[in-house]
Amino acid sequence: MRVFARPARWLTKLPLIHNTRFRLTVLVLLAALPAFALLTLTASEQRSDAIAAGREEAQRLVSLSAADQDRLIDSANQLLTTLGRLPEIRGNDSQACHNLLLSLIAAYPDYTDLAVVKRDGSVICSAISNQTNVDESIIKRTFARNAFQIGNYEAAASANQPTIGFAAPVLGSGTEPTRAVYAAVDLQSLNQRLGTFAAQAKFKPGSILTVYDSNGIVLVQYPAVGDTKVIGTSLASSPAVKTMLAQQTGVETVAGSDGQQYIMAYQTAVGSATDSGSGTAYVSLAVPSDEVLKLANASFQKNLGRLGIAALLAVVAAWIFADLFVRRDHETRKALVSELYQAFSSGSVDDLDEIVAPELVDHNPAPGQAPGLEGLKQVIAEFRAAFPDGEIVPQELLADHDKVVARVTLTGTQVANFFGIPSMGRPVTANGVETFRFASGLIVESWSMFGQLVPILPSEDDEGLGDLDHHRRGLLARLLRRR
């Protein structure tokens, strides 16, 4: 506590601390602190709720996008299974097979190639003739498992084109198939589909939907980020992509290459008809955190603005009406000082307990005056005994901060000794200036300065009393606390 004692004393000595306007302004600002704290707490809770809702929404949307990839795989399974039953595919007429596959390519623009392949990988027929580049690994796996298979999501070597291959066995009369139907899908052509999905799902502005292969290579991205083409680029070294490849499904808060924070949801995409060991894709949706928090931040800014306006109006009101409080306090203190002087004029000290503090400090006490309020009552009693008709009348009262300065005139007929001063037996007067300091509504300190005591009506006898008057005036001046 001692550490704060010295700064506290130093602050109390600053004139600004005693300024009513300043104190009222500080009071208004302190009153606004709980409201600001509550507003901040509410905003923090709203931000937390918004982040939680944003994470949930991102996970839902990425699940829908992954389901769209699943539908692509399932539709490829259905197409290849249906083709495997057609005579053009099962027969040996390569031209008829080519014509059929070519017509299907025109009908299904997402497919870049359709082909019928033997067990050894040689092409029987295809939609694009001898330009077919079949993924041999998927063909071997199809014959080995005798089931529909998905190739790896990959960026093809030619033109860095992201594709995925599918293959299904053509079941004949024997137990083992001798040929398979193969299809290749251009993933980059799915951008339009992703764009449609993003519009229907009402993605937040700045959201980025990305499809990766099992090695973290970007296959599809909507919309494309910046001017750099990221298709075919490996992002496996990115912490976010590393986490995605390891956990496969989840939601993370990550930092983007643009320095923004994103809520990134990710999920694997595999067809429902595939078996384990087939190729896997990963779909991620990155949503800017600022967009997720947009409503919460806007609400906070709006409420903060309202609180600021209310506080500003309160400060202005405190500043304007401070004069009323100051004037009221000043008038109250001047009225109390007038009541104190009324006690000298009437001799009644019953109300002094409500005006003067018991521990009053009189900086100019009369000889033998007791300390505190009792000493003041003693002076009043002596004054009334010496001046039965005496009174001290305020001529002017000035109030400033916690003090009242009074310019007063003492008048009265002295008929008895006053603290050892012999009676003059005639009306006298004296002018003085007294200062009173208030604390907690009571007078706690006083200072007095009085001039010489002079007769109101001088007579011829006054010439012979010059030395005596000088002695009386000097003593009275001291009694009346003149310095």
Image (cartoon, grey):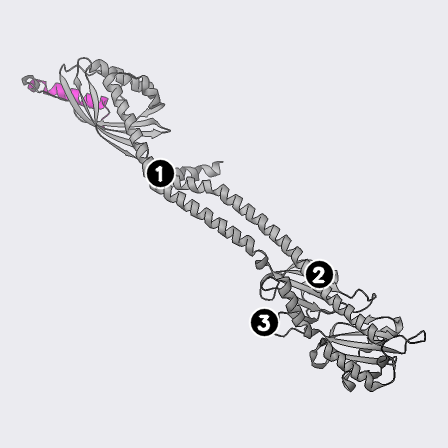
Q: Secondary structure at mark 1?
A: helix
Mark with earlier residue (1, 3): 1
Which segment did they paint magenta? 463-483
Q: Secondary structure at mark 3?
A: loop
Q: Residue at x 67, y 60 (%)?
A: 61
> Residue 201 lies in what quarter of the image?
bottom right
Q: Which mark is residue 226?
A: 3
Q: Is residue 317 above or below residue 454?
A: below
Q: Nearer the viewer, mark 1 or mark 2?
A: 2
Q: How far apart are the two marked residues, 1 and 2, measured between alpha carbons? A: 64 Å
Inspect the magenta stretch and tell me whether residue 474 lies in it.
yes
Q: Is residue 245 above or below residue 177?
A: above
Q: Residue at x 32, y 38 (%)?
A: 323
Q: Which mark is residue 63?
A: 2
Using the rendered image of the protein, determine whether residue 19 is visible from the camera's viewpoint: no
Q: Residues within 10 Å of mark 1 (few under 14, many from 20)?
A: some
Q: Nearer the viewer, mark 3 or mark 2?
A: 2
Q: Is residue 220 above or below residue 103?
A: above
- Name the residue type under label 2: Ser
- Cβ atoms at labels 1 and 3 below 8 Å apart: no
Residue 95 place in picture, x, y as percent? 82, 86
Q: Residues within 10 Å of mark 2 (few under 14, many from 20)?
A: many
* Mark 1, residue position: 20
Q: How far apart are the two marked residues, 1 and 3, measured between alpha carbons? A: 59 Å
- Name the residue type under label 3: Gly
Inspect the magenta stretch and tell me whether residue 56 lies in it.
no
Residue 130 place in picture, x, y as percent? 78, 86
